[in-house]
Amino acid sequence: MAATKLSPSEQVFLQKVMQKASLPDIYDARDITIVVLRSLRDLMSTDASERTAAAFDDEKIAQLWKDDNPIVAALAKLRPPLKVDTETFLRRIKQEGGLPKSVSPETAVIAVFSTVREELPPEQVKEISSYLPDGLKVMWDQI
């Protein structure tokens, strides 16, 4: 992804992810956040994903939630939620996230999940949790 200028709110959000996951760079945090959120959206219904996007107070943070690839975004509206287990989800993060060797997929997922949860109202946090397989629910609930 190109190094675009980040808004102040994106910087704060991504710095939290960067610190929680011990990532070396804010742009690594952005790239990993996008992969984790895309994978999370794939588990959810289109309506739930759209409710989540609308629940973010900050539009720039909501943009991280939304898919910036118009083809992927259109296809996501047509397909049902994916049924994947925790291991498959984590493998996807490892393969697509470009994680440094020192950062496990679990660490990255927990960092993104906990930072996202800070930005959402409790009812949205609960709705997202309802779509997660058991192992991911445990990670979603990490503080």
Image (cartoon, rainbow, N blue to C red):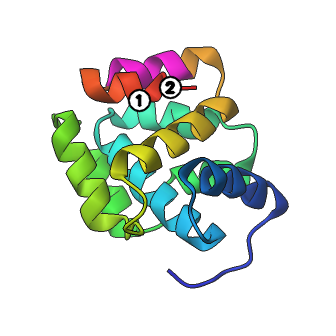
As helix, strand or loop, the secondary structure at mark 1 comes to helix
Q: Which mark is residue 60?
A: none
Please state if 72 lies on the left or on the right of 68 as rendered: left
Task: Out of 89 and 19, give the one closest to the viewer.
Answer: 19
> From the viewer's perspective, is residue 92 above or below residue 42?
below
Q: Residue 65 or 15: which is nearer the viewer?
A: 15
Between 7 and 80, which is closer to the camera in this rendering? 7
Rendered location of residue 136, percent (x, y): 33, 30
Label ID, residue 139: 1
Q: Residue furthest bottom?
A: 2
Q: Residue at x 61, y 51 (%)?
A: 17
Question: What is the three-letter code of the residue carrying label 2?
Answer: Gln
Q: What residue span does the magenta drawing correspond to?
A: 125-131
Measured as percent of width and height from the top left, residue 69 is found at 41, 69
Query: In which quadrant of the rendered view does residue 95 lie?
Result: bottom left
Disc 2/disc 1 C-alpha distance (Å): 5 Å
| Left or right, residue 65 beside residue 48 | right
Number of marks present in the image shown: 2
> Which of the two residues, 113 or 20, is positioned nearer the viewer here?
20
* Element class at badge 2: loop
Q: Is residue 21 visible?
A: yes
Check if residue 72 falls in the magenta segment.
no
Identify the residue shown where x is 18% and y is 41%.
Answer: 87
x, y percent for residue 109: 43, 44
Q: Amino acid at mark 1?
A: Met
Check residue 142 in the rendering and tell me which mark sits there, or answer none.
2
Residue 46 image point, x, y percent: 36, 37
